Amino acid sequence: MLNKNNFLLAVISIIILINPVVQAEGFENPQAFTEYIYNSYSERDFSEVYNNFAAELKRILPENKYTEFQQQNFEKYQLKYTEIKVSAAKEIDFKTIKDKFDYADDFGSYYQLQVSYLLKFKHFGSREEKSEKKVYIRKINDDFQIFWDYKNALNNDEAAEPADKNE
């Protein structure tokens, strides 16, 4: 009986430990990955978003700078992202990425997607607005990575306005 209970406990522990890893890897397509990133972002899981940044971006922007920047903006403006919809991915060339993100290195496949959502925030009263944003990602082998304009986070003396400058 004790061995059976230990075995059952071990199986449950393995399932619990493996589950987060399964969520973070193995996306079928760029849309599924982008949807996952935006859902993580809307749930304030900034560490998970950061973990999926392009490797070059992580060398420039420390995780604590990014997470502090996002936490400050979410708290300051009481941001809420809902009704998140991701368009079909369009494959793009490296030049398009390099024009937008000077830190990008050329390896992998690149995609552009359109994300739309309802953004609720407080700035001179409660507001909400439908917003759209272009998102750029890269696929290397089976992994996707997201690009992000990091300059606002490094110049955090003035927090970004809520209308998409903080993503």
Image: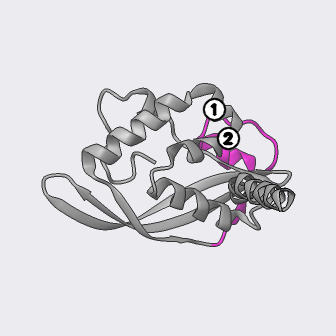
Number of numbered markers? 2
Give neighbour class at mark 2: few <14, some 14-19, many 20+ (Cα, 10 Å).
many
Q: Residue at x 58, y 56 (%)?
A: 37
Tell me where residue 34 appears, x and y as whole percent: 61, 61
Spatial distance from mark 1 to mark 2, Cα to Cα?
Answer: 7 Å
Q: Is residue 36 magenta?
A: no
Give neighbour class at mark 1: few <14, some 14-19, many 20+ (Cα, 10 Å).
some
Instruction: Please say if 150 is above or below 25.
Output: above
Instruction: Please say if 51 is above or below 5.
Output: above
Q: Residue at x 65, y 72 (%)?
A: 88
In depth, the one of 84 and 47 nearer the eye is 47
The amino acid pointed to by label 1 is Lys
The amino acid pointed to by label 2 is Ala
Residue numbers of the magenta segment: 88-109
| Circles 1 and 2: CB atoms closer than 8 Å | yes
Colour mapping? one colour
Badge 2 marks a residue whose secondary structure is loop
Instruction: Please say if 98 is above or below 13.
Output: above
- Which circle marks residue 58 in the picture? 1
Q: Is residue 103 magenta?
A: yes
Instruction: Please say if 37 is above or below 52.
Output: below
Tell me where residue 39 appears, x and y as whole percent: 52, 61
* Apparent side of residue 22 relative to residue 7 in the rendered image (left or right): left
* Apparent side of residue 94 relative to residue 79 in the rendered image (left or right): right
- Which circle marks residue 54 in the picture? 2
